[in-house]
Image (cartoon, rainbow, N blue to C red):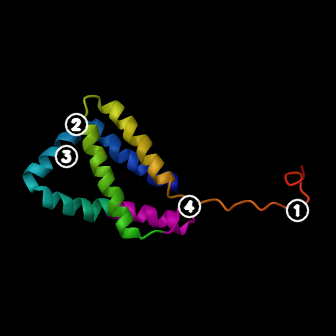
Amino acid sequence: MLEDVIGGCQLMIDAQLDPAVRRIALHDARSVLGWDVVRQIESRYGAVGIRGALRKAMNGGVIEPQPLRPLALLLAGALSEACFYVADADDPAAAREEVGRLIERILEGLKVSPEPRLQVAGSAQTQA
């Protein structure tokens, strides 16, 4: 389930490697519609998909329960900035690799922590 969230985020960033996507989605849309309208669209539609994937991962016990809406908005904002970073980079492929690793690290940090293992008295690990 977490892999689905990570994969979806990675696909969003991958799209920025296409010059047409970079031009239309990042630059032209903001010029034509304005920043406020684009932000509303990204909040409403981009964060909804992210929120659904996060909800599924939380309900599946894969990531720690968190306030869902702010987490989805935070992640959507980070992805938006990551997309700009890739789009405006001198080397978009290298920038894509950088942000891809960071997105994965951020999302991995939300995983449920494994329960600490209990030491059984008399086991080989406790005897020395």
Mark 3 residue type: Leu
Label 4: element kind: loop
Is residue 63 in the magenta section?
yes
Q: Residue at x 29, y 32 (%)?
A: 92
Sequence-earlier tag: 3 or 1: 3
Sequence-earlier tag: 4 or 2: 4
Sequence-earlier tag: 2 or 1: 2
Question: Residues in magenta?
Answer: 48-65
Residue under pointer 2? 88
**Mark toward the viewer: 2 or 1:** 1
Horizontally, is 14 left or right of 21 in the view?
A: right
Horizontally, is 39 left or right of 96 in the view?
A: left
Residue 62, disc? 4
Mark 4 residue type: Val
Residue 121, disc? 1
Mark 1 residue type: Ala
How far is disc 2 from disc 1 in space, using C-alphas? 59 Å
Q: Are marks 2 and 1 in contact (CB under 8 Å)?
A: no
Mark 2 residue type: Asp
Question: In the rendering, at what x and y percent does residue 120 appear?
Answer: 85, 62
Sequence-earlier tag: 1 or 4: 4
How far is disc 1 from disc 4 in space, using C-alphas? 31 Å
Crowding at mark 4 (Cα within 10 Å: few <14, some 14-19, many 20+): some
Residue under pointer 3? 26
Sequence-earlier tag: 4 or 3: 3
Question: In the rendering, at what x and y percent does residue 12 appear?
Answer: 34, 47
